[in-house]
Image (tube, rainbow, N blue to C red):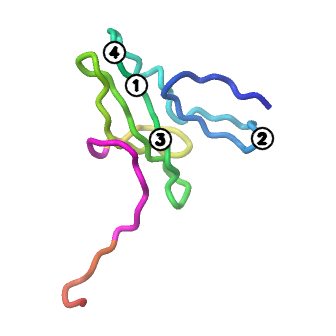
Amino acid sequence: MPTRDYGTGSIVTMRPDGTDQHVVLDGSVYAPTSDVDAPVGGFEPEWSPDGEQIAFTLDTPRDRQSVATVAVVPAQGGAVRQLTPGSSPAWQPIVTASRGSR
């Protein structure tokens, strides 16, 4: 089944056969109102280990360039939460130790 073109910077989930398409991030929301010399929107999506969230690089326009931050969005869509400047997100376990542990 052919997929619909949702535009640059959009993140869309779907079944392997292309059905049940769901827009998680609409890249057009981040389209610049002036000339920007770089793409904007969501790129490099990575599923969380539990499948509940998607981390991605969010490029937003600023001063004719795009500025990259790592962001997350619920896998079913919803509010985007920007986490930190940078790009190429990857889910990694967090290891903590209590006092007295060696």
Indicate whether 30 appears above or below 81.
above
Is disc 2 in contact with disc 1, using a CB cutoff of under 8 Å? no
Indicate whether 53 appears above or below 28.
below
The amino acid pointed to by label 1 is Val
The amino acid pointed to by label 2 is Asp
Magenta-drawn stretch contains 66: no
Dot 1 corresponds to which residue? 40
Dot 2 corresponds to which residue? 17
**Residue 85, percent across and down?**
26, 41
Indicate which label's residue lies in the foreground, 4 or 2: 4
Which residue of the protein is positioned furthest toward the top in this rendering? 34
State the residue at coordinates (33%, 27%): 60
Figure quadrant of the C terminus: bottom left
- Looking at the rendered structure, the secondary structure element under dot 4 is loop
Q: Which residues are magenta?
A: 83-94
Pointer 1: residues within 10 angstroms few (<14), some, or many (20+)? many
Dot 4 corresponds to which residue? 36
Left/right placement of residue 10 relative to residue 82 reads right
- Figure quadrant of residue 39: top left
Is disc 3 in contact with disc 1, using a CB cutoff of under 8 Å? no
The amino acid pointed to by label 3 is Glu
Between marks 3 and 1, how big is the CA–CA gap? 12 Å
Is disc 4 in contact with disc 1, using a CB cutoff of under 8 Å? yes
Sequence-wise first label, 4 or 3: 4
Is disc 4 in contact with disc 3, using a CB cutoff of under 8 Å? no
- Looking at the rendered structure, the secondary structure element under dot 2 is loop
State the residue at coordinates (48%, 25%): 27
Left/right placement of residue 60 relative to residue 43 reads left
Pointer 2: residues within 10 angstroms few (<14), some, or many (20+)? few
- Which mark is on residue 44? 3
